[in-house]
Amino acid sequence: MINLTITDKELKTTDAIKDYVEKKLERIEKYFVNEVITVNVKTKAEKNMQIAEMYVGVNGVNYKAVTEDRDLYASIDKDIDILEGQIRKTKTKKEKMQKDASIKQMTFSGEESVEIEDEVVKTLHYEIKPMSVEDAKIKLKEKPGNLFYTFINVDTQKVNVLYRLPDGKNFGIVEPEG
C-alpha cells in the first residue's frame, strides 16, 4: 500500500502527473509486498528546468532521489530509476548478509549452534589481467592488507600468483608447470 503525497512549488500538479507518478510507483511497490510505503513527491520549476524530488520510506529505511530535466515526466522517470536501484541494492545486500549468516552458523533444535569448519564459505570473483611481474608487485603493494595478487604473466602467458613472503619485504611467485 502506498501513501502518496505530492507537493508543488511554482508548478501546478495535475491529475495527469499524479496518475503518472502512481503508475511509475508500481515499480517500487513490487519490492515491498504487503508493506506500507510512504512516498513524498515534491515538484518545482527553476528557470527552464522541472525538478522532481522523491522520498520513499519503508520500515524505517528511507530512499531519496532528486533529478531535473526540461520535462517533468522525464525527471520522474529518472527518480524512479534511481530509487529502484537503491532499493534493489539494499535488498540484495540484506539478503546476502542473511545468507552469509546462515552459511557461517547453522542452528539445530533451536538452541545448539554448530560452527562450520573446513568448508569453502566465501568465493570472490575478480578480473585477472595480463601484466609483468613488476606491475603485479606494484598492484600488491597498493593494497597492504592483501597477501597475494593473481595475474596473467605477459612473458609466459600463464596465470601466476604473486605473494608476500613472511619477512614482509620480498615476494614469491606460484607458476604452473607445462
Image (cartoon, rainbow, N blue to C red):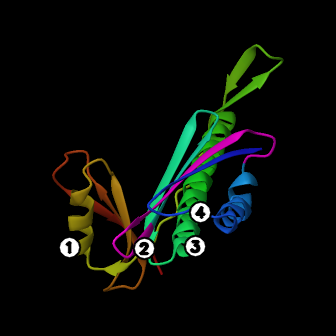
Q: Residue at x 69, y 68 (%)?
A: 16
Question: Is tag 1's residue or tag 2's residue first in the polypeptide sequence?
Answer: 2
Q: Residue at x 49, y 64 (%)?
A: 11
Residue that label 1 marks: 134
Q: What type is the residue that disc 1 sits on? A: Glu
Q: In this view, does 135 lie above or below 174?
A: below
Q: Distance between the residues labelled 3 and 1?
A: 53 Å
Residue that label 3 marks: 73
Q: Distance between the residues labelled 3 and 4?
A: 11 Å
Q: Is residue 88 above or below residue 100?
A: below
Looking at the image, is mark 3 or mark 2 nearer the viewer?
3
Q: Which of 75 and 90 is in front in this view?
A: 75
Q: Which of 15 and 141 is in front in this view?
A: 15
Q: How far apart are marks 1 and 2 (CA)?
A: 15 Å
Regarding mark 3 in the picture, which secondary structure is present there?
helix
Residue 71 place in picture, x, y as percent? 51, 77
Say whether marks 3 and 1 touch (CB < 8 Å).
no
Q: What type is the residue that disc 2 sits on? A: Ile
Say whether marks 4 and 2 touch (CB < 8 Å).
no
Residue 80's disc is 4
Residue 86 place in picture, x, y as percent? 54, 54
Question: Is tag 3's residue or tag 4's residue first in the polypeptide sequence?
Answer: 3
Secondary structure character of the magenta stretch overall: strand
Badge 1: residue crowd in 10 Å (few <14, some 14–19, many ≥20): few
Q: Which of 28 and 42 is in front in this view?
A: 42
Q: Distance between the residues labelled 1 and 4?
A: 46 Å
Looking at the image, is mark 3 or mark 1 nearer the viewer?
3
Badge 2: residue crowd in 10 Å (few <14, some 14–19, many ≥20): few
In the image, is residue 141 part of the stretch drawn in magenta? no
Question: Is tag 3's residue or tag 1's residue first in the polypeptide sequence?
Answer: 3
Can residue 175 be seen at all in this image of the molecule?
A: no
Can residue 84 be seen at all in this image of the molecule?
A: yes
